[in-house]
Image: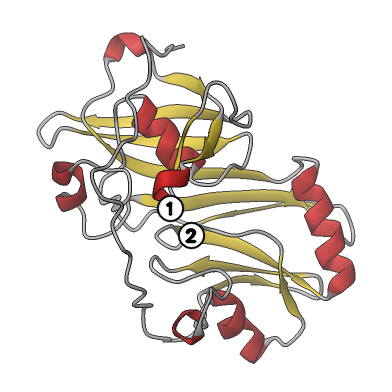
Amino acid sequence: MARLRGAPPPTEPSLCPTIVYNPPPDEGLDLVHEDEALLVLNKPAGLLSVPGRGEAHQDCLAHRVQRRHPDALIVHRLDLATSGLIVMARGPAMQAALSQAFADRRVHKRYEALLQGLMPPDWGETGEVNLPLGTDWLWRPMQKVDLSGGKPALTRWRVCARDAQRDRTRVELEPVTGRSHQLRVHMLALGHPMLGDPLYGSPASQCAMPRLALHAAHLALQHPLHDTPCAWHSPAPF
């Protein structure tokens, strides 16, 4: 299992980029599962999970879903730039039950990502990053490794493939905790930013992909009504 070597590289951008919100066109919902308790959907990259501030940021997955399912309520979120599986509750009782399952870490999520550079083979094929994270107040909404005042954050990673020709590594990521931008900052701390990341990537890694190469590929939980194990998978679109 690989360990971090030396201090993680600092996150000190010369300028925090301004993200202009340009959501993808509404071409219908990518509904993976539907029943009386919950909905599972594929969120496209570039779409907010919930509305933001101001009229220009009202188009979001929650509003699009609620036009078809008025009882649908948000339980968790994916970053604007992240695509993949997200679950919504059908009504307040199911929202409370699913929210408690997330709080108790009884919901299991795995992501797939493409990283800049080759993870060294002598790190092994699996590892973890256990570094506390906090808000970078000079460059909000960015986050940073904060060894003195950050909140505990743990990410497990597994190498899926190393592509020497294109100098990139495909990984599976499991966020044990759920801090803001956790996966992106932890991979940066390893020295391997995600491709296409407009906030944390190097210029070269930002140009390597037209979008953030991070996708919520696997979601598993106990059904809140009958406690049956449920699992869904969504292949990464990159």
Q: Which residue is mark 2?
A: 84
Locate residue 32: give its quadrant: bottom right
Task: Residue 223: name its quadrant.
Answer: bottom right
Q: Which is more toward the observer, 61 or 230?
A: 61
Q: Is residue 2 above or below residue 75?
A: above
Contact between marks 1 and 2 (CB within 8 A): the answer is yes
The colour scheme applied to this rendered structure is secondary structure
Residue drawn at point x = 48 percent, y = 59 percent: 84
For the residues marked 1 and 2, what is the alpha-carbon distance in whole angstroms? 5 Å
Relative to the observer, which residue lies in front, 198 or 86? 198
Where 201 sits versus 167, above or below?
A: below
Q: Position of residue 78 (x, y in %)?
A: 53, 58
Looking at the picture, which amino acid does disc 2 mark?
A: Gly
Identify the residue shown where x is 36% and y is 24%. 190
Q: Earlier in the sequence, mark 1 or mark 2?
A: 2
Please state the total of marks drawn on the protein image. Answer: 2
Q: Is residue 223 visible?
A: no
Q: Looking at the rendering, which quadrant does residue 187 occupy?
A: top left
Sort mark 2 into few (<14), some (14-19) or many (20+) by Cα contacts within 10 Å.
many
| Secondary element at image label 2 | strand
Mark 1 burial class by Cα count in 10 Å: few <14, some 14-19, many 20+: many
Q: Which residue is mark 1?
A: 215
Q: Secondary structure at mark 1?
A: strand
Residue at (37, 43) in percent of width and height? 113
Kind of residue at disc 1: His
> In the image, what residue occupies the spot 90% across and 68% down?
93
Residue found at the far bottom of this picture: 67
Identify the disc placed on residue 187: none
- Look at the picture and state if 208 lies above or below 48: above
